[in-house]
Image (cartoon, rainbow, N blue to C red):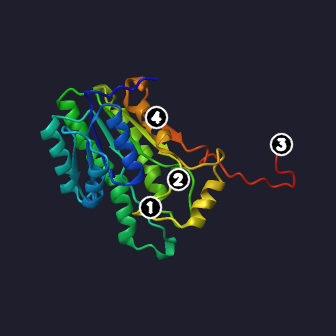
Amino acid sequence: MNHDLRGRRALVTGAGGVIGRWLVETLHEAGATVAASDSRQQALDELASDFPLGSDSFTVHADLTDEASIKQLADIVARRWGAADILVNNAGIYPSNFLLDTSTAEFDRVFAVNLRAPFILTREVATAMVRQSVKGAIVNISSGASRAMRRTLAPYCPSKTALDRLTKGFALELAEYGIRVNALEPGFTAGSSVSPLTPAYVESMIAHIPLARPTSKPDVGQALLYLVSDASSFVTGATLSVDGGGSIGPLAVHQEKKSAL
């Protein structure tokens, strides 16, 4: 299926991370002009150096825990483009701590980045879309953790559950303007420098994925292109899980016979 995004303008948060870079590169390769945002200037510089995005694209440093910074990000995009055609709320954090060791400040930061920031940025970007009569597409990057609790990631899980509900809320209210809002759930992906994972944890996670491998760029990229292109013109308020079955349930078999044949 052809996903031609030439002439479309896309804003991506968390662009300096593993999945964020995949999303930026995928959108660029499909012809979109991209505004890549991250809280880490070095990550943005490395992205721009490793993968030149063209003269019409740009990077923007933004602190998603700060409302003024989020609004400034939206204002920069509005001044450059009038309005974005695509918004991808990708930025997210998942610090690992047992609940009894989790500080209130850390709990608040998880919800600030994972839920509050997508709310503020979607509100601001969608307002510009409405004013410019842009029938845009908004994608929130969620997680299978929205439906299943994980030890030492307890604040992260409900932050994604709430993001899924927020996705449906925006989808319901923006439908009259022709703006579609959906969620995309990538599967397990290692390599984050913000929330590093131990080799043992990585091995354990992959062992529980029915299709027996971690998520790749094509997996996430093709799903994103579907959600932001005309191919999904009648899809809104949906959640697309691309995780090799990782969020379906455990693979453990509680009997001596371990395979069907």
Residue at mark 4 = 222
Image: 215 above or below 110 = above
Whether residues under marks 2 and 1 lie with C-beta atoms below 8 angstroms apart, the answer is yes
The amino acid pointed to by label 1 is Tyr
Q: Which mark is residue 65?
A: none
Classed neighbour count for the residue bearing mark 2: other residues with Cα under 10 Å, few (<14), some (14–19), many (≥20): some
Q: Position of residue 180 (x, y in %)?
A: 36, 31
Q: CA distance from mark 2 to mark 4?
A: 21 Å
Quadrant containing the C terminus in the rendered view:
top right
Q: CA distance from mark 4 to mark 3?
A: 32 Å
Mark 4 or mark 1, whichever is nearer to me: 4
- Side of 67 relative to 194 (left or right): left
Q: Which mark is residue 145?
A: 2
Give the mark nearest the N terminus, 3 or 2. Answer: 2
Residue at mark 3 = 260
Give the mark nearest the N terminus, 1 or 3. Answer: 1
Residue at mark 1 = 94
Mark 1 or mark 3, whichever is nearer to me: 3
Q: Secondary structure at mark 3?
A: loop
In-front residue for pair 160/52: 52
Mark 4 or mark 3, whichever is nearer to me: 4
Give the mark nearest the N terminus, 4 or 3. Answer: 4
Q: Position of residue 3 (x, y in %)?
A: 39, 26
